[in-house]
Image (tube, rainbow, N blue to C red):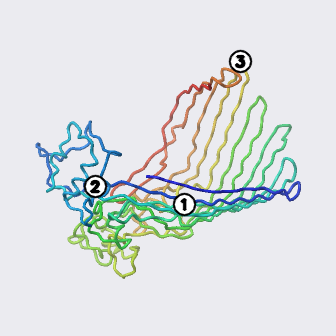
Amino acid sequence: TNSESLSFYGDATYDVTERLHVSAGVRWTDERKSRLGGIGVLAGIGGIFGADGSGPRIGTPGFEFAIQDRTIFDPDINGDGVITAAEKLTTYLDGINSDGVSDDFMALLTEATAGGLNVAAQNASVGDKFVDWRFRLAYDLSDDNMIYALVSTGHKAPGLNDNITPTVAPTYKGEKVTLYEIGTKNEFDLAGRKATLNLSMFYNDYRDQVFQSLISASAAANLLGLPQDQVPGGGGSIAFRFNAAKSSIKGFNLEGSIELPANIRLGGNLLYLDAKFDEGRVIDPRFGAFTTFPNADPNRFLGPFDPVTQPNYFDFLAGPPFNQTLNAFDFDGDGVLEGAGEDLTRDLKGNKLPRTPKWSINVNLSQVIELEKGSFDWLVNFAYRASHFLTAFNGTGVEPLTGEPAPSFYDKVDSYVNIDIGIGYNFDDDGRVRLEGYVSNLTQEIHATSQLSDGFNFNRWYNNPRTYGARLKLKL
């Protein structure tokens, strides 16, 4: 993958008076991304067994991918528009430098069995040009106090999805945000001690927000109106990114510090966030890929539950007493729920943005002790985070359509406090040799940091446990 960015920018400040200052800036950016590669999916390989009757082995010690030594990047080797089993096999073998010591898959894989391989080129590019700007007014109330107002814009570059067919790599637009902010910055003496107190209030208008859902490749193809016959991976899940929402983020940030006796410093900040979706409707991957069952009726949510013709685990939603008939989304507007591309969706309006606690508080206490030779210092930091959600669906452990308990629909993180401490010793006044010790997550706080669910898999990632160690720093 290659990324290129070309930009020109300028920024200037004009002093209207000794106290009133006007600043303005503009940036022009040209972002380009390109990709050269391929994808191979082994799903669908059947009838291949080792000598002991077990499934084939691949990736044992000694196995090595070709990576940059690969010479074939398009599985349609002869360019006739049809990817044959022989071309799939040749493309797959071109990506492997060596087998593992216990691998038997390559010996069992032949042209006759390679038809189940799903290979596709991953060659595509995307780019965009945009202009960002900022305008700021600042007024000095005194040499130590000022107020300001700011308006600025920002963009995040567009990107690529994995190829849905050999020739189609869906892109998504860049995100854009406009920031409005007012604030004040102040330095003053408090009982003879130096102190600072800063306050900012802000509003972010966030548009074309990118979301990622785990859906089947066939679902993504159907969503985009693409043919299904050469979809890599068949019904396998892919991470599909798309522009889906508009949101607003408003709040305030209060931060301050004070120098205490004995060279002790107390500092901290208080952040309040009200971050919500104003609009947006996205595929809800928690319901699974409905077309992975060959005899699943794509219109099964429109009628009574039939366990014979509708064996999908998630069809319990369509059965008594629920008789689910809502929330499938007719993307192509033809009045029919195809299933593959029209999975259940959620309206995000009013939901909180992921990982945006309403209240965040940080308090730190530190001291530097000057010694006859060198210095000793220590720091304790307390961090509080209010409860928040890990996904845009704001799941509380209840299936939103039926009211039934559903643990995989839970993505809330309760409030917590994290404590970190650190100590250090400088062996000389220049700090050229420094020894540090630290303890992170002193109280063994446990909380999830991210979550991913596609209906069949429910994964959570957690914060690091208590971690401690030492570092020796040398400045030459």
Label 2 crowd bin: few (<14), some (14–19), many (20+), radius 10 Å: some
The three-letter code of the residue at mark 1 reads Leu
Quadrant in the rendering for residue 47? bottom left
**Residues at marks 2 and 1, CA–CA distance in whole angstroms:** 34 Å
Q: Point out the image quarter for the C terminus.
A: top right
Q: Is residue 40 left or right of residue 283?
A: left
Question: Mark 2 and mark 3 in contact (Cβ < 8 Å)?
Answer: no
**Residues at marks 3 and 2, CA–CA distance in whole angstroms:** 63 Å
The three-letter code of the residue at mark 2 reads Val
Q: Is residue 91 left or right of residue 162?
A: left
Q: Tell me where residue 113 appears, x and y as whole percent.
A: 16, 55
The three-letter code of the residue at mark 3 reads Lys
SS of the residue under disc 3: loop
Label 3 crowd bin: few (<14), some (14–19), many (20+), radius 10 Å: few
**Of pointers 3 and 2, the one earlier in the residue sequence:** 2
**Residues at marks 3 and 1, CA–CA distance in whole angstroms:** 51 Å
> What residue is shown with label 1?
353
Q: Tell me where residue 411 appears, x and y as whole percent.
A: 46, 56
Q: Residue 373 — which label? A: 3
> What residue is shown with label 2?
41
SS of the residue under disc 1: loop
SS of the residue under disc 2: strand
Q: Is residue 319 above or below residue 14?
A: below
Mark 3 or mark 1: which is in front? 3
